[in-house]
Image (tube, rainbow, N blue to C red):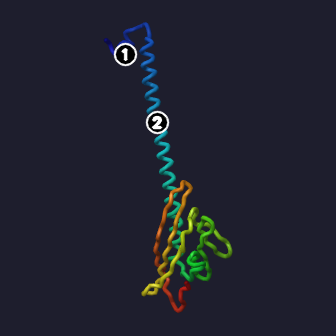
Amino acid sequence: MQFLPLKLWLNDKGFTLIEILLAFCLFTVFLVIFSGFIINLSRTVDVYANIIEKNETLLSALDQLKTFIKTGYPVALLQNGSCLQIAMGKNLIEIYPKDSNLLVKHLNTANPILDHCSIMGPLFALEVMENGKIHVQVSLDFLFQDNSQEHLDLQYLSWCEVGNEEVEE
């Protein structure tokens, strides 16, 4: 019995039906395995792309919140802790939820900094520390488009110190 490649060189008659069927079956098996691999790879890429997108959304919103709280002066909590008012120099900004967005309001214009957050209670809490710094607690719940949920409890310390004015709660 000779191997197929050696038989091809020695035989001038061509391929037999069994050889063609065997080659077609091997090609089909290879094609099915390769297609399954590509499909699974595509699904994996989609899943990780969604995870990366969620993380980038959360991190950018948290970075904006941190910047507002650390560089501003948290002045007051409004609407039972759902709205945080921060003094940025002479300007007042408000951070509050509406529908499923977290908005920043400045000069009567509100811009979203975070989508898909759900309100489960007071978002913000203020506490004046012994050293005069203002401790801000943020509690956010997120519901994403793929129905996954995240909960974050954050604590920031404002760089500003409380002077003669008191923080309103």
Q: Residue furthest bottom?
A: 164
Instruction: Name the residue nearer the viewer: 46 or 160.
Output: 46
The image quadrant that residue 96 belongs to is bottom right
**In this picture, is 58 found above or below 13?**
below
Instruction: Name the residue nearer the viewer: 169 or 39.
Output: 169
User: What residue does disc 1 label?
Assistant: 4
Residue 161 rendering spot, x and y as whole percentages: 48, 85
Residue 36, numbered label = 2
Classify the position of the N terminus by image quarter.
top left
Give the left or right position of residue 78, taking residue 10 as reference: right
Q: Residue at x 46, y 84 (%)?
A: 133
Instruction: Name the residue nearer the viewer: 158 or 122.
Output: 122
Q: Residue at x 56, y 83 (%)?
A: 75
Give the left or right position of residue 125, taking residue 99 as reference: left
The image quadrant that residue 103 belongs to is bottom right
**Count of labels shown?**
2
Classify the position of the C terminus by image quarter.
bottom right
Q: Identify residue type, mark 1.
A: Leu
Q: Identify residue type, mark 2.
A: Gly
Residue 91, numbered label = none
